[in-house]
Image: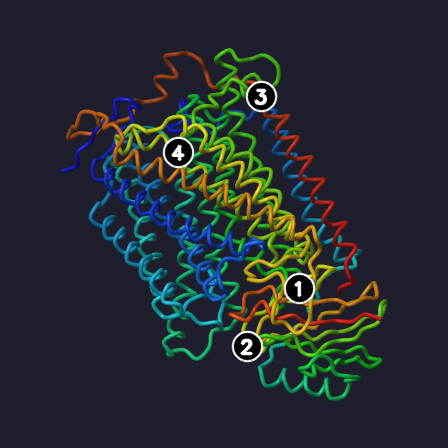
Amino acid sequence: MAQYRTCPRTGLQFDLAADKLMRWNAVAGVLWLLVGGITALLVILTRWPAIKLLPADQFYLILTVHGVDMLIFWIIFFEIAVLYFASSTLLRCRLATPKVAWAAFWLMVVGSIMANVAIFQGESSVMFTSYVPMMAAPHFYLGIILFAVGALIGCGVFFGTLVVAKRDKTYTGSVPLVTFGALTAAIIAVFTILAGAGILLPTLLWSVGLIKEVDAQLYRMVWWALGHSSQQINVAAHVSIWYLTAAVIFGAKPLSEKVSRFAFLLYILFLQLASAHHLLSDPGMSAEWKVLNTSYFMYFAVMASMIHGFTVPGAIEAAQRQKGLTNGLFEWLRKAPWGNPVFSGMFISLVSFGFLGGISGVVLGTEQINMLMHNTFYVPGHFHTTVVTGTTLAFMAITYLLVPTLFRREMMFPKLCQIQPYLYGISMSVLGLVMMGAGTLGVSRRHWDMAFSGAPFQYEWPGAAYLMMGLTGIFGVIAVIGGGLWIFLVVWSLLFGKQLDGGPVSDKPTPIPDQSLAAHASGTGSHDHVSVPGTVVLAMTLLVCFILYYFVNWKYLSEVWGLS
Amino acid sequence: MSAILPPSDRLWWKTPISSQEWVWIGIAFVWGMTMFVMMIYWHINGKQNLSNEVYKTTTEMFTAKTEAFVKENTIRTETEQQIPVAKPNAKGEAFLLARLWAWYPILELEAGKTYKIHLSAVDYNHGFSLQPTNINIQVVPGYEHVVKMTPTKAGTYSIVCNEYCGIGHHTMLGRIYVK
């Protein structure tokens, strides 16, 4: 029999079984973030030309750990917690099959440990991407497969919970927008994981000698249907968290349910084509295939992100203006709670993802322009402003809310909590920028030595490239401190923070009151649109930056050797 | 009332969209289409497009072809390792082989002339990163990519390997001379 508690501070209702699962999944994620963070520091200190800490073999090993633990284990553990929250908590129902959810959790734990053991044993320094024919130890692939199966089961529990809520009638009408966004994330996760199984299973068989060969180009194509699409799960998840934050902090209502949901739907329809833009400079695909797929089918998924980039701040602006903050263009933003890390983290995430990650991603993903940046340091520069300042920062920010409500502990050191999103978000954004700067000058990613010691020739990178790499070192270290501070604050608060009342426990869930009745009673129809001029100005600024940067890169491209 | 509750208007799909949202959706759509057309435009009028000419190959086949090319076109050798410098004949066909951890051979080209460079890897994935002009192409084993290149300026160019290929990755530096 499921039991429920209602958090006295937020009014959120938790199924106790889901409550525990969310906490364990989140904690497992944070532990992998810790490993990822320590390895991040080692990577940074090695790529900083003035320091060059590790020898080559250890560098590639540590870089593999950093990629795998951050991009897969940290993020997906946390996302499973988000899925359980968006279903059982927001819909106020019991979690479907908690036992199966625990099986999923343990599979993920075993898988993630197995893959890490394989890498640390030294025979699997194949990077996150593990391109064949470079071979890792079989338990590297097996670990990732087990983890993926666990995550897939987790998605199944999420879908089951949606069915439970519908059947038990714990809500009326449609699911909330945040749950809808989480649903898109879970749907993308399903086909992402299936694509991953499609390539990693044969690769596992190849690594134990049962299959003679896995085609190198085919591997790259199918693997990226896992590798990039899994980042699209993150986008759908962190956009949902932006809406969640706007709702919790401001009581913000989406400008239009229809527009926001349609934008999420575009993600499902077109994001899976993302694998293509890792193959723009590959031999095996035709230009027509590249043009159609790279654009995520004619940029409809980009349009979706541009829509969210407008409607999230728009919803906040509308809520603030309705509270009377109507002076000028930006009073709503100036008087936002900048001292609240939930908000500041979310807003830095939004701006950095849009201006840095979004623009650089589209430019990088343009068929011909890709040849200027493919496999350069620009690529990790780009994804540190999407997956890190976008997703990870959004997850960090929401944790400041989850610690009191989910873990029932008060956050300690509130002053440090206030500065952490700024420290981390800003240093990581600058890090992304200088990495992209180095990449624009041609510096390679995944490369141990800019001086090419031991090579038969010499090549001297331009001085500016060394400057950019030095700045990468400095801002990288600051970012690691910012991330470490977050881990410290969260772990310390979980261990020693003041225990908070979890709220009364009951056997029965309290359904969500019928919204349409409330709306009807208050008599404020939903047809009154609030004008959001500040958001329009922000969006136009983004567009101008986007257009300028896009065409500057065509100009760069026109100056290189002729290619046909 | 908010994004964490069911929509207050049960028929939310019938609520009209405000004009400011319509305008932004329109702008995003037009900009997306512009970017889409730009790629096609560049295929028609641009001078930097990656070749579509690709053949399946094998390690033995590509090595043999490259050796034949080197034998026929070598004009001198360089460095202690006696790396051959090959100058493609009038037809402009050249072979460039990527392996652990070298680009083979060194090519000598002329500015303004167009060459068909056959590019492939015989072991792992490698990355052709031509510096300082900055052109980056993935080199995949099993695939022979015929890239047409027209050097613009005389000089000494380096080929950095920018796809991770193991412990000696950072020593994998090749060379192209443009006269």
Which chain letter goes with mark 1? B
Badge 1 crowding class, 10 Å Cα cut-off, few under 14, some 14 to 19, many 20 or more, is many
Label 4–label 3 contact, CB within 8 A: no
Residue beneath disc 3: A532
Between the C-alphas of marks 3 and 1, the distance is 46 Å
Q: Is residue A245 above or below residue A367?
A: above
Q: Which label was assigned to residue A409?
A: none
Pinpoint the chain carrying mark 2: B
Tell me, yes or no, whether the two marked residues, 2 and 3, touch with CB atoms within 8 Å: no
Residue carrying label 4: A398
On residue B129, which mark appears?
1
**Amino acid type, label 2:** Asp
Same chain under badges 2 and 4? The reply is no
Please check whether the numbered discs 1 and 4 fall on a single chain.
no
How far apart, in angstroms, are the residues tagged by discs 1 and 4?
41 Å
Label 2 residue SS: loop
Q: Where does the image place residue A74, in percent across and percent down from the top left?
A: 38, 48
Mark 4 against mark 3, which lies toward the viewer?
4
Which tag, 1 or 2, sits closer to the chain's start?
A: 2
